[in-house]
Image: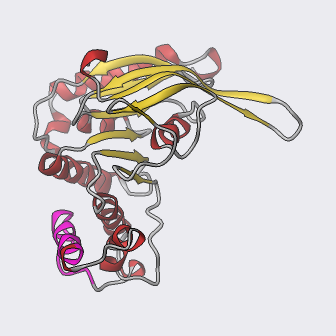
Amino acid sequence: MTWAAATIMVEGVVKSFRSRGGQETMALRDVSFPVGAGEIIAIVGPSGCGKSTLLRIVAGLMAPTAGSVTVDGQRVTGPRPETGFIFQRPALLPWRTVRENVLLPADVRGRRDADALRAADDLLGLVGLDGFGGHFPTELSGGMRGRVGLARALASAPTLLLMDEPFGALDALSREAMAVELGRIWSARQPTVLLVTHDVEEAVSLADRVLVMMPRPGTIAADLPIDLPRPRSIDLLTSDAFVARTVAVRAALRASASPSET
């Protein structure tokens, strides 16, 4: 991806935090990368390297200490209605049904109407939850709650979808199934996606590019293209091409690690 073709530009982003005692800790240092429209970018790196902090800066939930993020030529200075965010735990409202949770963005905007109700049901069908609109979150499995969180994030028709370890609480088989499901949903809507994950296989199975971050202060150590055909199925996970790319990502992770991390 070239800078000239980018719709999202992360340029020279630095983030520092100051403790109550006045000590400054740098979480991110000179992070720069372009993102093209409709790309899926996976961000991997060791714990504490600033992956989630970077995602929050792109979302406009946190301001950088230096540098900038622009989307479609506009500098990000706060949350944008065109951006959806999915956290590791979907944080569904337990007193609202599945359908009511998906309708939350429409309620916040004061736009609940027949079209919003129809769109919510369409989204539940899209994520494979037809017939579950009247259930409550406590009646669902972890994987199903993750699907509700995805439907809720899609309810505002985001052009940019940010995902912070969205499948982290699931078992391995459920993670694989949800990764394939996300790929199918992306094919239907094709938003731009930034995905933070610790799972190398998940990153390779979903992404067009994998960004490898160095230990804190986090910066981009490698930008690896994943030139695998779409749609990607679970069968892909055993192919030689897939294994070769996971090996490349792991090698980049090892190369970027500090001596204490190896």
Q: Is residue 136 above or below residue 84?
A: below
Q: Is residue 2 visible?
A: no
Q: Is residue 218 above or below residue 170?
A: above
The residue at 20%/66% (across/down) is: 123
- Dividing the picture into quadrants, the one containing residue 207 is top left
- Dividing the picture into quadrants, the one containing residue 24 is top right
Would you say the magenta stretch is mainly helix, strand or loop?
Answer: helix
Q: Indicate the position of residue 203 as horizontal and vertical percent values.
A: 32, 36
The residue at 57%/20% (across/down) is: 262
- The residues colored magenta run 116-133
The residue at 38%/45% (across/down) is: 162
- Dividing the picture into quadrants, the one containing residue 117 is bottom left
Q: Is residue 132 magenta?
A: yes
Q: Is residue 243 magenta?
A: no
Residue 229 falls left or right of residue 86: left
The residue at 28%/86% (across/down) is: 134
Q: Quadrant of the N terminus?
A: top left
Q: Is residue 199 visible?
A: yes
Q: Indicate the position of residue 11 as horizontal and vertical percent values.
A: 47, 21
Q: Nearer the viewer, residue 109 or 122?
A: 109
Q: Is residue 156 above or below residue 134?
A: above
